[in-house]
Image (tube, helix red, strand yellow):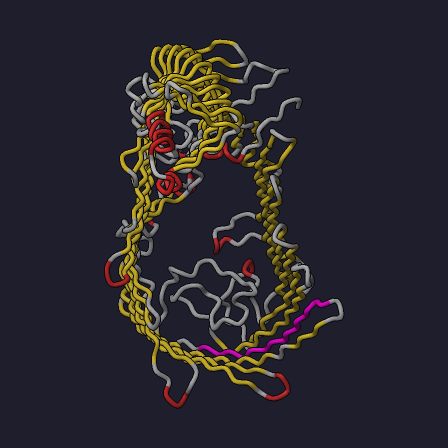
Amino acid sequence: MTAGRLFVLLWALLFWPATAIAQVASLVADEISIDAEGRLSANGNVEVFFEGARLSAAGVVYDDAGQSLQLIGPVVLTEESGSVLLAESATLDPELQSAVMESARVILDDQMQIAAGQVRRVNDRFTDLQRVIASTCSVCASNPTPTWEIRASRVIHDQEERQLYFSDAQFRFLGVPIFYSPQLRFPDPSVQRASGLLLPALRSSSSLGTGFEFPYFRVINDNTDLLLTPYLSPETRTLQFRYRQNSGAGRLRFEGAVSSDSLTDDPRGYLFGTGFFALPRDFRLAFGLEAVSDRAYLLDYDFSNKDRLTNFVTLSRVRRDDALAFSATGFRTLRARDAGLENQFPDRVLEAGYRLKLPTGSLGGQAWGAVDGRILRRPSDDDVFGRDVGRIGASATWWRAFALGGGFEAETEAQLALDAYSIQNDSRFEEVVTRAIPSFATTLRWPLQKTETSGARSLLEPVAQIAWTDVTGGDVPNEDSRVVEFDEGNLLALSRFPGFDVYEEGLRANLGVSWTQIRQSGNEIGLTLGKVFRADDLGQFWDGTGLAGRSSDWLTAARLKIGSDLHLTNRALLGNDLSLTINETRLAYARGRNAISSTYVRSVAEPEEGRIDPLNELAFVSVFGIERNWRGRAELRYDFENERASRALAGLIYENECFAVDVSVSRRYTSSTVVDPTTTFRVGFSLAGFGDDAAQNRARQACGR
């Protein structure tokens, strides 16, 4: 409440009709009197309520002749915004627009405390504070020195712009002066985004030396901002940037960096970008941009672990009965082992597809048709290694479910696909190839449910499927099905190849059984067992996929859920002799301040899928609370096959109501012809109270602790 508003309030109390007063404000006091000279006095537990604000004082004296208003302290003004002003006394000036408060303290947004010898409120907008100490730290009688504070000869708080302007500012840490500036500007705690310099961070790297990051944040408008971060060390001059734009029509994000360093003689940099836009008639446009100057740049600066860059643009529309999509994609490999072979990899792919729900008439069930096409190009024109492929295809699929007696359920699916290929620069294939691929499958299920006396529900479901597929026509190269997954999700699929170039052929039986139990507590456990049997081994699958031979490996899958905190899943492929082909275990745990995410993968080598050596690797990420204000974090990626870590990180975070410190050290052990092992040390520091939303959720330190 401003002084002017308070004057209007008291004037209304004196001269307005009672009905009008009730609509404006309320005054409560132990005693209210008017003396012979016309002075109004309110004494004893005075409280005034006006437009969401509350004023408390020991007494109020209004002198109509001198047009002055005095508040006898202690004075406490609590505004609707949450700001609190405390003073020993307050006096309005003759113009009734400004107020002077002695020995005052301002609390902004329940975070920042500003103590001042004198406070003047001007024109319902500015608060002028003299001889100031500002901090967001708790101050106790036993510990009167805050962890950090800013001392200034003067501070002006612009409530309209929500800015704090400090003059002759001295920053102190643990009572020790460490920084001085004649002028400083900070957003007040109510501001979520404000332009200005952010606190620097210390960064030390074994390859780039020790340096500092100096971030500058710029608010362009309500929907757009820019972050510029110079990184300076003896070995590099780097400018990092991030641009964000978010509106109702879409969103954009670009990030990147440019560098001049001692590692190379040439300028270096990278640019990543993403965008999404809603267009008329339910269309969606999305794009992704990834570019880098050289193979090692992202790893040298720890910007990203990407080993392949992908650039794309897609236009899509999904409606109830149809879906349409167009996309153009470009690739670039950053892997050291691919050096010199880039022209042999596809670098441009154009794709289009349309899917439509079809009427079924007397057949019942569901039916849909699809038309799709793809053009794939390589930079090379060499035979085989420069192969270019174009494909157009069409398919029709029909599916129907039947309820049988005895609790049995049946499903039938039929599909016919037609393909036409144009193959260039590969003498092993005809230039034009056409194919027809009919497929059929029928599935029988027997779901059995049981409810136990404890309330737990169990579901046991054996399932058997007979499937058949035949491919007639010429041979085509396999461009889109180089990696094959076998899991509970595709146990009953018509084809376990992910693309269109290869179909799983022949007559086969897919058998499985699953069991799920859900307890009243919400805990859940599930198990799945499956296997594929074939009439003939057509040699389509490689040994490392678990699908080779006339019968596949045993598929086992297990999942465990305990409340909403713990999720554990495992999938394994086991040979008939119980030898392990693939094993994947994932753990996710989150409770309170503790969180763990871990993945363990082990598989045999499979050169056809790019696994030259066996894989035996653990990836682990954890954040954990140590005590009230301390948290730790750890990351590890360990290769058991080669008995070495590829990446490790350890960090400590200390945070309270007024500041936070983040210290971390990371080590990248992997080395190649372009990147050496690197150790990076980083220290980040942030102050609460200047637009720091996270500070509102931090525990405020209690006195005596």
Q: Main secondary structure of the magenta part?
A: strand
Asked if one can make out residue 688 in the rendered structure from this viewpoint, the answer is no
Q: Is residue 110 above or below residue 510?
A: above
Q: Quadrant of the C terminus?
A: top right
State the extent of the magenta-drawn residues as a range: 455-469
Q: Quadrant of the N terminus?
A: top left
Number of numbered discs on residues: 0
- Closer-to-camera residue (675/120): 120
- Closer-to-camera residue (343/35): 35
Residue under the image location 35 percent in, 41 percent down: 20
Indicate yes or no whether the magenta region holds residue 456.
yes
Residue under the image location 51 percent in, 14 percent down: 173
The answer to whether 164 appears left or right of 84 in the picture is: left
Residue under the image location 45 percent in, 17 percent down: 89
Indicate yes or no whether the magenta region holds residue 600.
no
Q: Residue furthest front?
A: 36
Q: Is residue 27 above or below residue 478?
A: above
Residue under the image location 27 percent in, 37 percent down: 221
Q: Is residue 516 above or below residue 205?
A: below
Q: Residue furthest bottom?
A: 362
Percent x, y for residue 313? 29, 52
Percent x, y for residue 554? 63, 65
Tell me which corner region of the image, top left, top right, bottom left or bottom right, holds residue 271. Answer: top left
- Closer-to-camera residue (166/231): 166
Q: Residue furthest left?
A: 280
Q: Is residue 517 above or below residue 202?
A: below
Asked if one can make out residue 11 in the rendered structure from this viewpoint, the answer is yes
- Closer-to-camera residue (68/280): 68
Percent x, y for residue 56? 49, 27
Tell me which corner region of the image, top left, top right, bottom left or bottom right, holds residue 543. Answer: bottom right
Percent x, y for residue 646? 54, 36
The answer to whether 693 appears left or right of 584 in the picture is: left
